[in-house]
Image (cartoon, rainbow, N blue to C red):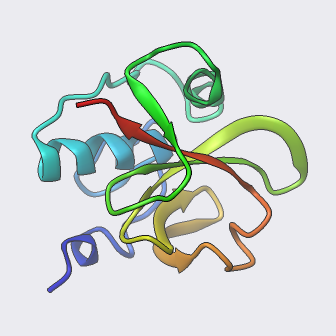
Amino acid sequence: MDWWANYVGLPFEDGGRGPYSFDCWGLVREIYADRLGVALPSYGEISARDLARIARTMGGAKDDGWQAINVPRALDVVLMRSGRGGSCVVHVGVMVDGRRVLHVEAAAATAVVPLTHISVAGRVMGFRRLAE
């Protein structure tokens, strides 16, 4: 079974840190802990809406331990803007391979979709890899 299959279908919860419900950052955090043994900050006291600020920080140019990359691979983080457009990063997901992303939003449970899927196409603002 693919590693990401255990996460598919889990519901969204504002501030969700798992293991049975998540917000977008909670999902990234859980995957990094499970798959890479990396403990990312929880930001558990911050609502999912305020996590947009954290996503914007990852999208910025400052050195925060995340490398901007052009060609994604499994476990890289995807930075996304709102579905309504805009230039700010407000959502994150995790690549399951070089062309599909696992993510969760208030409107839907966790799902794996291709980067060309209507739910993410046009929203991707970049990819980040945790510096080694």
How many numbered marks are there?
A: 0
**Which of 116 and 71 lies nearest the eye of the viewer?**
71
* Above or below: residue 25 compared with residue 27: above
Identify the residue at image location x=58%, y=31%. 55
Q: Is residue 34 left or right of residue 57?
A: left
Identify the residue at image location x=47%, y=74%. 111
Q: Position of residue 123 (x, y in %)?
A: 75, 57
Q: Residue furthest bottom?
A: 1
Q: Is residue 20 left or right of residue 111?
A: left
Q: Is residue 125 left or right of residue 38?
A: right
Q: Which corner quadrant holds the C terminus?
A: top left
* Above or below: residue 44 compared with residue 11: above
Identify the residue at image location x=48%, y=14%. 63
Identify the residue at image location x=14%, y=86%. 1
**Which of 77 and 27 lies nearest the eye of the viewer?**
77
Q: Quadrant of residue 121?
A: bottom right
* Above or below: residue 65 compared with residue 123: above
Q: Residue furthest left?
A: 37
Q: Position of residue 97 (x, y in %)?
A: 37, 71
Q: Is residue 11 left or right of residue 89?
A: left
Q: Position of residue 7 (x, y in %)?
A: 29, 68
* Above or below: residue 62 compared with residue 14: above
Q: Residue furthest front?
A: 70
Q: Position of residue 57 (x, y in %)?
A: 59, 20
